[in-house]
Image: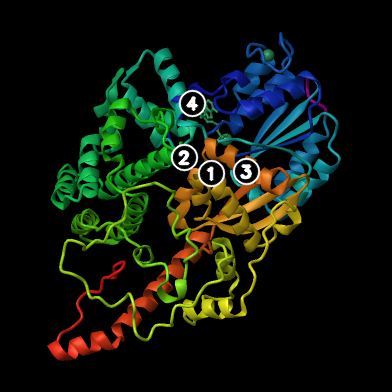
Amino acid sequence: MAYLGLARKWRPQTFDDLVGQSHIARTISNAIKTGRVSQGYLFTGTRGIGKTSAARIFAKAIRCQQTQEPGVPCNKCNDCTEISEGRSTDVLEIDGASNNGVDAVREIRENAKYLPSSGKHKIYIIDEVHMLTTAAFNALLKTLEEPPAHVVFVFATTDPQKIPATVLSRCQRFDFKRVSQKDLSGRLKHICEAEKVSINPDALAILAREAEGSMRDAVSLLDQILSVGGTKITLETVTEALGLVDKKTILDCVTGIIRRRPLDAVDAVGRVYLHGFDLKQFGREILRYIRQIMVARLLEENAGGTPVNLSAYMEMSDVDLDDMKELLHERSLDDLDMLFRMLNHGLEDVARSTIPKMVMDVLVMKMASTEEMIALSDLSGPDDLGGVGASGTGGGARAPGSGPQKKSAHSDQAPPLKAAAQPQQATPAAPVAPTRSRAAELIAAIEAPQPAPQAPASALSARAATNAPAPSITINAPKELHDASSWIKIVTAIKDQKPMVGSILEHLSFEGLVENGPLLVLTLGFVKDHSFYRDQLQSHAYTELLVQLLKNHLGRAVRLDYKEVLSSRSIEEVERQRRKQVDDQRRASVLESEAVKAAQQLLGARLERLDIQENA
Ligand SMILES: Nc1ncnc2c1ncn2[C@@H]1O[C@H](COP(=O)(O)OP(=O)(O)O)[C@@H](O)[C@H]1O
Ligand SMILES: [Mg+2]
Ligand SMILES: [Zn+2]
């Protein structure tokens, strides 16, 4: 494991010192102040964010004899120093990973019966408690059910799902959060100052970024850099030590891709390769950059035209932000989404390949050569093929007014075949029940057991023939929201109020709504490639807004849960499949049309390309 020099030295000693977990620190020190200490605590969260540190601070705070202020350990008395140094006989730290059997727990139970050697409390800190065997948990439960009055248990785990409900229900649970980049770099800066080290602000930002929310990783990285870089840390020291490509090369590559200059993009890859950097790491940097552009775009759209102070959200220096702004409006969000996916996918090939450089070259070339994305359905007249999707709202997750106007990718080339507008065999345009909203269409699509094998046009005209009335939409009653269809109504309503939030929601699937005490817990699913949307919603600003919107619609407080799903039935996905069906059908009808067949025969020609144009 990582060398712990600085990390150990800088272990927080008071709750004030514990960065980024103030919600927990406050609750626990209040409990101590008011003398309401429970006998079981569970600290959850990823590695290196302060669980063990908090457990020790807590132990000191309840045992310290010389404290001036309840809840705040003096860190000087015998008790405090013993606990800090891990040699107190009344505060026992047990590693659940290595002591995971029944015997270990029996020993704890035996030991717990005896009064503390001094003071009132005996504290057992069991780390990685999820590693205990079932038998060990059962043994533990006996003690937890009727703990001796002087005993307090603090369990820490990175994996709370693995802890039996019986144990969970006897503990007060605290979820530790990943530490934000701002807090990470703040702490690192503080440490550098105290250690009399000067560090370049960009270097600091990179360390904080690479730590991905773990304070221990951040401090360990700093330690690592200090061991090679002396007391003056430059940007180069950090990029070299971490094997990172410099920003200019990344920017050059992204610019090449976005501005459709394949050679520039390949050139950047060449430089990376020449310097012996890891191509996959480089690919991830490009991926990150495209994601940043998307975030910036979403922020802008959400602000509805008013200028956004991007630097408040983006954790980028002003110079870098200026560079990015140059690229911000060159591509539509759909395009960016496509580039992101291409790269995300392609990087797997790069990783697997024995000739990664070539694969990477081709990947960036392809990305830089993509045409603007056009959905065929956007090009067609409203009455084509029975007016599928012709409720006037249009498809896609695009917010109104976003991105450049879509245009035909080939509009400057030879005139396309004039076939799509009135294909002979196509179902005659059937009028669509005008009351059917897009939501209702989607509900029908989602509720269909499988993507309907028959053509959507005929399905629709059948519906039109029976003249089925549109289902009425009511949203307020919470018990109604138990299926995907109510979910669509809610998303549609949210989209009206907050287009961006609604658009993001369309990329997630409804996975269930359950009651949990006074709360409703809404689970949303995302496929791996779309974790971007989840991240988006999880950002602070969105979470608050979304929770509020949902509360308005459901009449109750809502907690959001996300889970990764293998295949998505998100609104967007269903819509995409529907559009694809329409396109496929339209293409098929063109290919089979008498006019095309005749032309082929007459000229001995082969159909090379098929473009469908509006009003052609
Ligand atoms: N919230 C935090 N504030 C300040 N330092 C932290 C924090 N979390 C972790 N650290 C640093 O990381 C080291 C390990 O933290 P620890 O409490 O053992 O994390 P965990 O138990 O969550 O894995 C600490 O000694 C400290 O240097
Ligand atoms: Mg720990
Ligand atoms: Zn003390």
Q: Which is more N-terminal, label 2 or label 3?
A: 2
Disc 2/disc 4 C-alpha distance (Å): 26 Å
- Residue 591 is left or right of residue 192, and the answer is left
Amino acid, disc 1: Lys
Dot in front, 2 or 4: 2
* Image: 154 above or below 189: below
Residue located at (59% from left, 22% from top): 85
Amino acid type, callout 3:
Leu
Instruction: Decide if residue 113 is on the left or right side of residue 562.
Output: right
Could you tell me which secondary element the residue under label 4 belongs to? helix
Name the amino acid, label 4: Asp
Depth order, front residue of 103/503: 503
In the displayed structure, would residue 157 be above or below residue 343? above
Contact between marks 1 and 3 (CB within 8 A): the answer is: yes
Q: Which residue is mark 3?
A: 549
Q: Residues within 10 Å of mark 3 (few under 14, many from 20)?
A: many
* Dot placed on the residue nearer the N-terminal end, 2 or 1: 2
Circles 2 and 1: CB distance less than 8 Å? yes
User: Could you tell me the amino acid type at mark 2?
Assistant: Asn
Say whether residue 81 is visible: yes
How many numbered marks, from 0 up? 4
Of callouts 2 and 4, the N-terminal one: 4
Task: State the residue position of label 2.
Answer: 302
Say which quadrant the C terminus sits in: bottom left
Q: Is residue 120 above or below residue 257?
A: above
Element assignment for label 2: helix
